[in-house]
Image: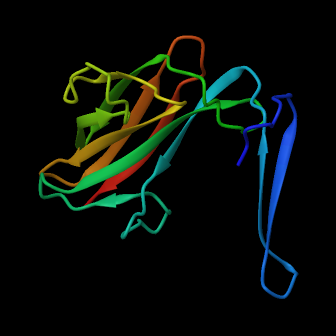
């Protein structure tokens, strides 16, 4: 319980101890700096190309879920960021939808724009019917854009 914890910028480290009294797990969280760039993290990808790219089947139905994160220059998530993100997909795939997990958000899922919620959101890319390469690009005001290459076979 954290009722009496006082906020201060910096870092906090939590250590969980096992029954034997030795550390079993630990987690460190650092205060984020100013938002700097966008990071794209493909969800668990069952298939990857020989080059390590996410691989989708060229059946017009295969989906790739990508987590979009607003990060500071040191790679820390910026959990207070809620800026609007814009998505585009070029090549052998298309934009399908996005969602941010905010139950009060009124943005439409199938439009290629969505605000971040707690610094994150998810974008869904759908394969096309023909093989080739595709690129997901995410842009937001004040941040470096990010791109993710995808192979469709």
Q: Residue at x 31, y 52 (%)?
A: 64
**From the viewer's perspective, is residue 4 above or below residue 16?**
above
Total labels: the figure holds 0
User: Which one is nearer the viewer's eye here, 151 or 38?
Assistant: 38
How far across and how far down the image is residue 119, in percent?
54, 30
How far across and how far down the image is residue 82, in percent?
50, 20
How far across and how far down the image is residue 65, in percent?
35, 49
Decide if residue 30 is on the left or right side of residue 77: right
- The quarter holding residue 90 reads top left
How far across and how far down the image is residue 43, in percent?
42, 56
**From the viewer's perspective, is residue 40 above or below residue 152?**
above
Q: Residue at x 32, y 22 (%)?
A: 105
Decide if residue 1 is on the left or right side of residue 60: right
Decide if residue 130 is on the left or right side of residue 16: left
- The quarter holding residue 34 reads top right
- The quarter holding residue 48 reads bottom left
Q: Residue at x 60, y 22 (%)?
A: 144
User: Which one is nearer the viewer's eye here, 25 or 61?
Assistant: 25
Which residue, as the protein is rendered here, is positioned at the far top? 141
User: Which one is nearer the viewer's eye here, 55 or 105?
Assistant: 105
């Amino acid at each position: 319980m954290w009722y009496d914890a006082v906020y201060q910028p910096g870092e906090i480290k939590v250590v969980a101890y096992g029954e034997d009294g030795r550390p079993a797990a630990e987690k460190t969280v650092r205060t984020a700096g100013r938002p700097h760039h966008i990071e794209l993290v493909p969800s668990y990808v069952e298939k990857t190309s020989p080059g390590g790219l996410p691989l989708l089947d060229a059946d017009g139905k295969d989906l790739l879920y990508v987590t979009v994160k607003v990060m500071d220059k040191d790679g820390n998530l910026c959990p207070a960021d809620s800026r609007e993100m814009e998505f585009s997909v070029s090549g052998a795939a298309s934009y399908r939808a996005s969602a941010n997990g905010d139950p009060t958000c009124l943005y439409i899922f199938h439009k290629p724009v969505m605000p971040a919620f707690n610094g994150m959101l998810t974008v869904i890319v759908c394969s096309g019917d023909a093989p080739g390469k595709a690129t997901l690009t995410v842009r937001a005001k004040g941040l470096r854009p990010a791109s993710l290459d995808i192979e469709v076979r």
